[in-house]
Image (cartoon, rainbow, N blue to C red):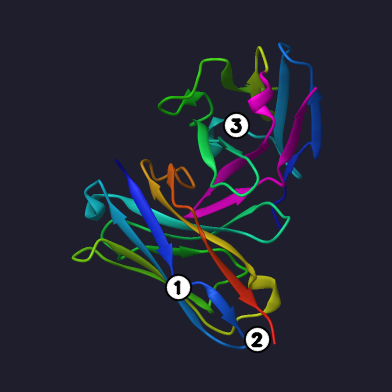
Amino acid sequence: EVQLLESGGGLVQPGGSLRLSCAASGFTFSTYAMSWVRQAPGKGLQWVSAINSGGDGTYYADSVKGRFTISRDNSKNTLYLQMNSLGAEDTAVYYCAKKLRWYTAGDDWGQGTLVTVSP
Amino acid sequence: QTVVTQEPSFSVSPGGTVTLTCGLSSGSVSTTYYPSWYQQTPGQAPRTLIYNTNTRSSGVPDRFSGSILGNKAALTITGAQADDESDYYCVLYMGSGIWVFGGGTKLTVL
């Protein structure tokens, strides 16, 4: 059974940093692309970032480009999202997702971790 | 700036059929955008329903179907049930490693 467990969310001040993790199990992590999708409170889903299976191809939404970095450690079956220069607009539940096919935003989803940016 | 459009809300009677659409602010949606559809209930993670326009994800009942209707992607639910009351999101692959979600449709079954 595919399991994706996000962690690392919490309260952070504007301008601060946070690193999210997504621990994967139940599948061969190193062979799948992964993504992060977020959802601000009461709002819709927003694609944030994607990474290919080897980790050498990374992609970002314009809203986070230059501030967020996606990475993965295939030896630890873990996906990361390093978030810097956080602002109130980054407050959201962040979901990690396994991509069965490159052209989907995600196919199997974690339960999410909440990031709150507030003074 | 690409905007993916969805109806903000829709209502369907139990047992009825409803079609939700997914369009572009500029241009037409085609299969080359690989439209996908997700269902989400409050407080829960998204659930993948449809990918690559019309392929159902594993375990999704066949009363959910995807298609291209005119210049939009479409999600049709036939024989709507009470537990279909959810938010539905489409997402389009814009190429070059970029995806854009629509704003979502809140479906009410009553």
Q: Same chain for marks 1 and 2?
A: yes
Q: Amino acid at mark 1?
A: Gly
Residue at far left of view: A75
The magenta span reads: B81-110
Above or below, A117 against A56 in this view is below
Label 1: chain letter = A
**Circle 3 chain:** B
The residue located at (73%, 38%) in the rendering is B105
Q: Is residue B91 magenta?
A: yes
**A78 up-or-down from B11: above or below:** below
Q: Which comes sooner in the sequence, label 1 or label 2?
A: 1
Tag 1, which secondary structure?
A: loop
Q: Is residue B28 shown to the viewer in this render? A: yes
Q: Residue B30 — which label? A: 3
Residue A8, numbered label? 1
Image x and y of residue B54, in percent: 52, 24
Residue B24: x and y in percent read 71, 41
